[in-house]
Image (spheres, rainbow, N blue to C red):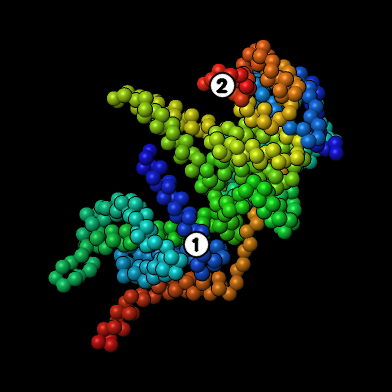
Amino acid sequence: MCSIDGTLLDFKNLDRLAAGDTGIHRLDPRAKVVVTLVFVVCVVSCGKYELAALLPFFLFPVFMVTLADIPALYLAKKIAVIIPFAVMVGMFNPLLDRQAVLHVGALGISGGWVSFASIVVRAILTVSSALVLVAVTGFPAICAALERMGMPQPFAVQLLFLYRYIFVLTEEGAQVSRARELRTFGGRGRGIRVYGSMIGHLLLRTWMRAERIHMAMLARGFSGAFHTRRQFCFGTRETAFVLGWSLFFITARLVPVAHLLGSLVTGIL
Amino acid sequence: MSHHIVEVKGLHHTYPDGTLALRNISLRITHGESVAVIGANGAGKSTLLQHFNGYLTPTAGEIRIGDFPLTRETLPDIRRTVGMVFQNPDDQLFMPTVYDDVAFGPLNLGLPAGEVDERVRAALAKVGAVHLQGKPPYRLSGGEKKRVAIATVLSMSPDILVMDEPTNGLDPFARRQLMGLLREFHHTRIFTSHDLDMVLDLCERTIVLHEGEVKADGPTREIFADAALLAECRLEKPLSMQGCPVCGSSA
């Protein structure tokens, strides 16, 4: 559970970055959400043997990290946590797909290795863009933006509550687990039955807390509609941001930019 | 100003599982009074408090807040009139930032944006938490959370302030700070607490609940002077009224 505590703390750090005040931070959240969505769709839809085509996409996270003053090392560590999952997904590709598709000198590289690399690179790209989005926008603003763009309000409110109480819930979970830890000796008291009742207990507690929160909301005149005071302003900067990047992503997806650049360079040489 | 009055007549409450929590409670709290509701665990304090803003409905009996009887129709008015601060501030602070949380009530009242902003600032200034306005609730200390929880209620400008265990879980300094804050309010104030020294300090009147009934209702000092009553209700004198443990002299 200690590790959960640690990850949680880090989650809060990500949120703290969202309090920054750079040009990127000041952009309307909707613009950032849209651009990230286009980015993810373009990256994910790339073919499985395409590796070079993915390279131009790195420009976006690098651009955001630089302009928004996000500590790159911190972000890299966060991404490193996710990579093993991507590695697991693509692990068997090199074994199953042995046909050489790429030749570097005399060395043939099999399709399996290329698709494996492509999975990992795509994971790095999408995860980094999602983390960057949270770091430059903040979770509540993302929810508000999604709502403004047509997501039904109950979903937005659910997401907000999830975000608010995930900290409280993990803390409670950690406490319950610590309490059990302190009273287990040897292998006894660790079984699935104890675990089951712990989870059940946590659920009941959550339920009761939800009731108390509802009570607190009613006490302050809650009647179903969730008001926010967030001011949105979609101006020329936002339009330029969305159009510019979307155009870039779609071009990078459809036109082999890396190849063109390569042939341009070789042409000049 | 009759809208600061809380009147309870013959209140009974039985929980759905059959537990009889309140029996024939009658009391009247008038404008500007500061009243403590004390009693052992399970005496019915929180249940009584939850009737004051209509979260629980009486099984029998009547409640009037100011000019209105508590009914479904008057509920919105009553919830504006009675500001309720819960025991656990984590249940009360559910918005992304302190500012949003304090603005939640006024926005629900349908106030214009400028007015909301004014009220939020005033409420935060009153509890000394202006510097916390941009912070998310999980970054606050216990004392800060408690003060912000009070601000969330103050921003609705209630006439009656109801607090469940206000000093619970606070360090001595935060406790003093909170008591200083509560002393400055001129609302009608109703507290429940096990912190009997705070009760002695802040409330001129005390109501003692015992097994769902009003056992005593009178000036705080008189109640705390009645040793037999306190013992029967599983209470004791506030520490400041007990003898000195070092030199043995009585207070």
Q: Nearer the viewer, residue B48 or B144?
A: B144
The residue tagged 2 is B244
Q: To which quarter of the image does residue B211 belong?
A: top right
Where residue B165 sits: x, y (%)? Answer: 62, 31
Looking at the image, residue A195 sits to the left or right of residue A18; the answer is left
Disc 1 to disc 2, C-alpha distance: 54 Å
Where residue B13 sits: x, y (%)? Answer: 71, 22
Q: Residue furthest left?
A: A106
Decide: few, some or many residues near mark 2? Use Cα within 10 Å; few <14, some 14-19, many ≥20: few
Q: Is residue B237 above or below residue A90?
A: above
Q: Nearer the viewer, residue A184 or A261?
A: A184
The residue tagged 1 is A20
Q: Is residue B167 above or below residue B136?
A: above
Quarter of the figure that contains the N terminus of chain A: top left
Q: Is residue B148 above or below residue B114?
A: above
Kind of residue indicated by mark 2: Cys
